[in-house]
Amino acid sequence: MSNLTRQQFSELLSQRVLFLDGAYGTELFKRGYIKNREPIELLNITNPDAVLSLQTDYVNAGVDFLLTNTFSANRHKLMKLGYDQYFGEINRAAVKIAKEAAKTSDKPVYVLGDISSVGEMIEPLGELKSKYVYNIFEEQVEALVEAGVDGIIIETMSDIKEAKLAYLAAREVAPNLPILVSMTFEENSVAVTGTSLELYVALFNDLDVDVIGINCTLTPDKMVPLVRKLAGLSKKPIFAEPNAGKPVLSSDDRLTYKTTPEEFTVYVEDYVELGANIVGGCCGTGPEHIKYMVQHIGLKKPKTRKINQLDVITSRVHMFNVEPFLIVGERINASAKKKLHNEIREFNFEHVLKLAKSQEQEGAHAIDLNFGIESVLLEEHFSKVIVELDRIVSIPISFDIQHNEFLESALIEYPGRPLINSSKALPEELDKKVKLLKKYGGLLVVLAMGKEIPKTAEERYELGRRAIEYLEIQGIDRSRIFVDPLVLPIGANQDYSVTLDTIRMLSNDGIRTILGLSNFSFGMPNRDELNASFLALAMHSGLSAAILNTSEELTMRILRGMKRILGKEASQFGEEIKSSEL
Amino acid sequence: MSNLTRQQFSELLSQRVLFLDGAYGTELFKRGYIKNREPIELLNITNPDAVLSLQTDYVNAGVDFLLTNTFSANRHKLMKLGYDQYFGEINRAAVKIAKEAAKTSDKPVYVLGDISSVGEMIEPLGELKSKYVYNIFEEQVEALVEAGVDGIIIETMSDIKEAKLAYLAAREVAPNLPILVSMTFEENSVAVTGTSLELYVALFNDLDVDVIGINCTLTPDKMVPLVRKLAGLSKKPIFAEPNAGKPVLSSDDRLTYKTTPEEFTVYVEDYVELGANIVGGCCGTGPEHIKYMVQHIGLKKPKTRKINQLDVITSRVHMFNVEPFLIVGERINASAKKKLHNEIREFNFEHVLKLAKSQEQEGAHAIDLNFGIESVLLEEHFSKVIVELDRIVSIPISFDIQHNEFLESALIEYPGRPLINSSKALPEELDKKVKLLKKYGGLLVVLAMGKEIPKTAEERYELGRRAIEYLEIQGIDRSRIFVDPLVLPIGANQDYSVTLDTIRMLSNDGIRTILGLSNFSFGMPNRDELNASFLALAMHSGLSAAILNTSEELTMRILRGMKRILGKEASQFGEEIKSSEL
Ligand SMILES: [Zn+2]
Ligand SMILES: [Zn+2]
Ligand SMILES: [Zn+2]
C-alpha cells in the first residue's frame, strides 16, 4: 500500500470518524515488558514481537491509524537515558513493526510516526535552544519518514513553543504528509506551561497542520469540555485521546487505570457528538477500550461544527481580541534612539524589556518591536530578544522588523500568533510576507503605499483594497490583515483628511485599519494633544487599531472615551480573554 | 424749522462731513464769565447773553450743530454743586439760547442736547445704582427733548456702563431723534476705567445709536491713531472732537490751551481723510478753531471706510474673538445644585464668584450664568450678580436666564457685548430675544428645536437655518447667532451622529454652532473622557463654540489639540485681544 497523501487523508476525514489506537507505555507495562528505566521504545529492537502483538491487537480492535512506538525516541531523550546510539534503529524498527501490524488488517490501516517532547524545557522555560530542539525533531521526523510512515503525529506537548518547533520540523521534512498536532491540558484548559487551549488553537489554526488535537492528562469525562471548546474554535479537523482514568496504585504497587471500556466509550461518543473527527486513547487505554469504542461508534459521518473565529493576537499566555480596537505600544523603537540601539547591539536588552513591561502596564495589547538600523545587527539579536520578552512580558509582539531573515529568526522563537508590521502593498513584498504568515501564523500590516505614498485617499484605498484581494487569493483572510492608511506629520502636511478618508473607505469595505499615530505629531510640541485629538477623529472614521504611545495618558483616555462613544466598550475589550468567557 | 428726523440726519451724514462746535467751559472761562465753583450751565439763566454770544460765534464759524450748554446740567451733578433747584430752568434755557443762536444762520444749524457723566461712579466702580443713574439721564433727556432739541449727544464718558445707561435713557425718551455717543480715551486707546476703544465700539455697534465718537482728553495729533481705529471698527458714522492741546498754567494762573486753529485743523483734516463723518472741538477750542476748520475742510463727501468686523464678545475690560472657537464655562449652574441655589436666593454670591474666577483661570472666554429655578428669585438677584461679576472677573458673561424680565435686569447692568443663551427656534420666542438684542446688543444662541427636539439632523438643521433667516430679516446678522444643534445624553440615546450631522450642515451654510457639551455625558462615569472625545468629533464637524466644563483638563487639552489640527491656533485665539493687535 502506498503512502497516504494529504488529499486522501482529508477525504477520509470528511467521510467518517476515524480511530486511533490506545496506549503503548501503560499497556506494555501491564503486559510485563518494561524493565527498570529502559525506554519502552527499546522494545522495538529488543522484543519487536511484544510491540507487534500489541499493535496487532489494536488493528484487530478496528483502528484506522497505528502510532509508531517512538514517543520518546528522539535523540535528546534517548541520550538522557543512555540509549542514543540506538536512535536510528529504534525509529526504523518502530515503523517496520507498525507497518507489519497494519498489514494484518483487511481494511487500510495507516501508520503515523509518533513524536513527543524532548523531555527538557526550551528557553525561556528551560535551557534548551530552539535551534537544537528543532534539529532533534527534524532528525526524528526524517528517520520516521524515511522508514515509510503515512503521517506524523506530534502529541502530549505541554509547551506551545516545543509543539511549534516540532510542527515546523515535521512540515519542513514532510511537506506532503498529514501532520496531527496535540497538546495536553489540565482540567482548566490550560497547559502546565500557562498556555490555554484557546491560545494553542489560535496559533495552530494558522499553521499548515492537518488535524488539531488534545490528548492525555484528563479522564474521558473531564476532557468533554475541552473537546467542546476545541470543536468550537478549531478551523482544522480535530482529534482527542483521553486517558483511561487517573492512575491509581494497586495492591501490587503498580499504577493502574480504572476507566472501563464502556465508560471510556460513553465520553468518546460525546466527543464525536461535539464534532471530533478522530478519537483514540491515551495512557491506560488498551485494545479492549479501542475495540469497544470502534464497535459502538462504528461508521459515523463527522458532525458539522459551528466555529467561533479566534480573532486574536496571542503570546504564550495572553490573547487580545483584535476587535473592537487593538492598542500596540510604539515605544520599543530604536530608530531614533542611538543609546538604545547601541545597547541592543551589545545584547543588552534591559531597557527594551523595561519599555515592554511599562507598555504592558499602561494598557498595550501588543508591543511593537523596532530595532532601528538592522544592517549592524545579527539574527541572534532578534531571536534572543523574543526569548527574553517571552520571559518578562505576557502580551503579544508586533514584529516591526525590516529584513525578512531577521523577522523569521524572531518568528521561530515566538510562542504565539503575532502581528507582522509591515509590508508595502507591492506583490513582491507581499509574497514574502505570505510565506511567513503561512509558516508562522499571525496577522499582517499592509501599508497603503507602493514605492511611494499616494497623495489621495482614493489611491491609498485602492492600494489597500487590492492588497487585501491579492492576499485573500493566497489564502490569507482579511481578518488577518490591517491596512495602514498612513498619516504624515501635521507639521509638514496639513492634509490629514486623506488619512481619515482612506480609513473610512477601507472600513466601509470591512477592511481593518491600523495607524502609526505618533507620526501625526512628529516634530511638534505637546504631541499628546495632537495624537489624542487625531485618534478621536480616526476612530470615528472607523480605525481598528493604532500603534501609539501608551504613556500618553491623554491618548489612552480619549481612546477609552471614543470606545464608549462608538459603543465598543465590550466587556472583554482591551483585556485578556479568559478561557471561561469563550 | 422743524426737528431733524433720524432719516434726514442720516442723509445729511451721507452727503458731506458735518461740523460740531467747540468748547463751552474753557471758552466761557476765557471770556471771564466763570466765577468760583459755579457750574457754567448756570449762565444759561444768570447770563444767557454770554452763552448766546458764544453760540452765535460758533454759528458764524460755520457749524452744523450747536451743543446745548448742559454738559453738567443733570440733576445729580447740580445737586452736588447745590443748584439742583434750577435743573429744569437751566436745561430749558440752554435749548432756547441754542435755538436762538442757530436761527442767526442762513444755513440749517441743529441743536443737540448735550449730556455727560453724572460725575460720580456707578457700581461696581463706585456707589451709584444703575437705576438711579438711568433716571438722572432720563430726566435730563426729557427736559431737553421737551425743550425742542434736534438730537442728543452723550459725550466725554469714561465709564462704558454710564455711557450705556445714558444711551438707554436717551433712546427710550427719544426713539426718533438722532443720538450721538462719545467716550473719552487715554493715548493708549483705553479709558481710565479700563475699557478700550475696541470694547466700546463692539458694544455700541450693536446699539441703536446714530453716530459713535470719541472726544476730549487728547490733543489733535494724539487722537489720530484713535480715529484710525474707530474708523476701522465702527459700523456707524463716526465723529471726533480733540482738545486744543494740553492745558498749561499761564503766568496769570489760568489754564490755557496752546494748539492753534491751524495746527488743530491739520489733524482734523486727517480725521476726515480717515473717514470721520463729523468733527468738532473739545476743551480749549473756540470759535477761531472751528472757523478755521470749517473753512479749510469745507464741503467734503465722507471717505468710504473699510471696516473690520468686531466679531467678539466683551466684558468691561476684555474681549474674545468668537472665531475660531469660543469656550463658555458651564459651571455656574444652580439647576441641579440645591446648596448653590439656596445661597443665590440669600444674595450670597461667594460661591458663584469663586466659580467664575476659577473658570476664568481655567481658560474660559465667557461664563455661563444659570441660576436654576427662577420662580423663587427676584430681579435684584440678577442685577446684583452682574455687578459683582463685573467687580471680580474680567471675562464676558453668557446669560443663561429663562425669564425675559430677569434677563433684561441683568443685561441693563452689563458693561459689554454679551452672549444670550438661549431661545428656542420659535418666532414668538425669537421676537422677544430680538428686542433684547437690539436694545442691549450681543449674540444669541438659538436652540435647534421648536416645542420638541427633532429626531433627525435634517429637521434640526432646517429649524436652525430658518431661525437664522428670520433673525437676519430683522437685522440680526448671522455673525451674532450661534445655533445649538443639541446633544442628548449618550446614556439615553446613541444617536449622537444627528448632532454631528446637524453641525456639519449648519457649518456648511456658514452658520455658527455651539454645544452644551457635558449633556452628552450626563449620568455617565468618567465624563471627561466622553466630553473630550465628543468635542474632537464636533470640532471636526465644524463646531464654533462650546459650553463646557473648563476644569476638565482632558477636554481643554483636546480642545487645544483640535484647534491645532484644524489650523485654528491663530495667535489671538483664546486670548484677550490686545488693542495693539487691532
Ligand atoms: Zn497519556
Ligand atoms: Zn498517549
Ligand atoms: Zn473736553
Image (spheres, coloured by chain):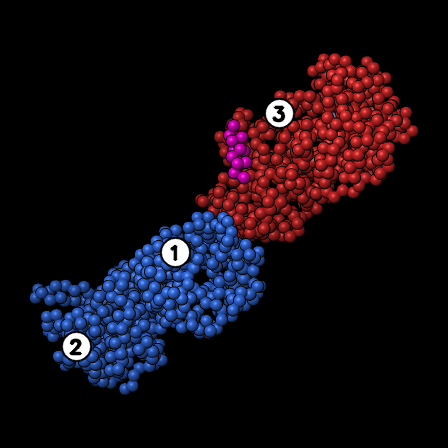
Chain colours: A red, B blue
Q: Say few, some or many: other residues with alpha carbon within 10 Å of mark 1 (under 14 / 14 to 19 / 20 or more).
A: few
Q: Secondary structure at mark 2?
A: helix
Q: Give me the chain letter of mark 1.
A: B
Counting from the top left corner in percent of width and height, residue A256 is at: 76, 22
Residue indicated by mark 3: A125
Which one is in front, B46 or A566?
A566
In the picture shown, does residue A441 fall above or below B34?
A: above
Which one is in front, A479 or A577?
A577
The answer to whether residue B171 is left or right of residue B489 is left
Instruction: Name the kind of residue labelled 2 in the image.
Output: Gln
In the picture shown, does residue B365 fall above or below B446?
A: above
Q: Give me the chain letter of mark 3.
A: A
Ligand 1 sits in quadrant: top right
Instruction: Name the kind of residue labelled 1 in the image.
Output: Lys
Q: In this picture, which residue range is highlighted in magenta? A: A350-363
Q: Secondary structure at mark 3?
A: loop
In the picture shown, does residue A322 fall above or below B576?
A: above
The answer to whether residue A335 is left or right of residue A428 is left
Mark nearest the camera among 3 and 1 is 1
Whether the residues at callouts 3 and 1 have beta carbons within 8 Å, the answer is no
The residue positioned 46% from the left and 50% from the top of the image is B555
The residue positioned 75% from the left and 17% from the top of the image is A251
Residue indicated by mark 2: B85
Residue indicated by mark 1: B339
Q: Say few, some or many: other residues with alpha carbon within 10 Å of mark 3 (under 14 / 14 to 19 / 20 or more).
A: some
Instruction: Name the kind of residue labelled 3 in the image.
Output: Leu
Distance Cα–Cα, label 3 vs label 1: 63 Å
Residue A114 visible in the current orientation: no
